[in-house]
Amino acid sequence: MSSLKLIINGDAIEIPDSVNTVSELLQHFQLDQKVVIVEKNKEILQKEHHVAENVQDGDQFELVHFVGGG
């Protein structure tokens, strides 16, 4: 099985190469895209672009997940 090498929040990781889009990347990490800000290669992505934005070997991401509570 092949994998993609990414940098996520400063850490080098490998994910399955079946993850093709930012939306799939968020699903892989079980993150709800409604409460996540995604920066890809130093550019913040609009949520509506998550489905179409491709993930490629070597991409760098910052994922910020908001957690509510009280």
Image: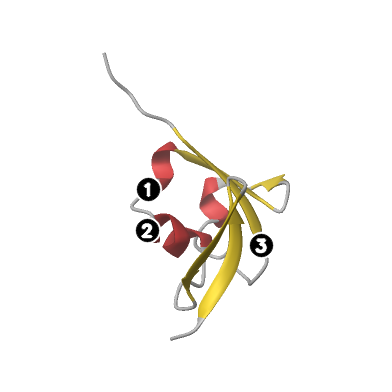
Mark 2: few/some/many CA within 10 Å (<14, 14-19, 20+): few
Amino acid under disc 3: Asp
Q: Name the residue under label 1.
A: 31
C-beta proximity under 8 Å, tags 2 and 3? no
Q: Mark 3 points at which residue?
A: 59
Q: Mark 2 points at which residue?
A: 27
**25 relative position to 12: left or right:** left
* Residue with the most extreme right position: 42
Residue 23 in the image: above or below residue 38:
below
x, y percentage for residue 53? 59, 63
Mark pair 1, 3: CA separation: 18 Å
Outermost residue on the bottom side: it is 1
Q: Residue at x 43, y 64 (%)?
A: 24
Q: How crowded is mark 1: few (under 14 residues within 10 Å), some or many (20 or more)?
A: some
In the image, farthest residue toward the left: 70
- The residue positioned 38% from the left and 61% from the top of the image is 28
Q: Identity of the amino acid at label 1?
A: Leu
Q: Distance between the residues labelled 2 and 1?
A: 6 Å
Local secondary structure at mark 1? loop
Determine crowd level at label 3: few under 14, some 14-19, many 20+ residues with C-alpha closer than 10 A.
some
Q: Nearer the viewer, residue 26 or 16?
A: 16
Element class at badge 3: loop
Specify the color scheme: secondary structure
Q: Which of the two residues, 46 or 21, is positioned nearer the viewer here?
A: 21
**Visible in this render: residue 19?**
yes
Tag 2–tag 1 contact (CB < 8 Å): yes
Q: Where is residue 64 in the image (x, y as percent from the top left)?
A: 51, 37
On screen, residue 53 versus residue 2, left or right, reads right
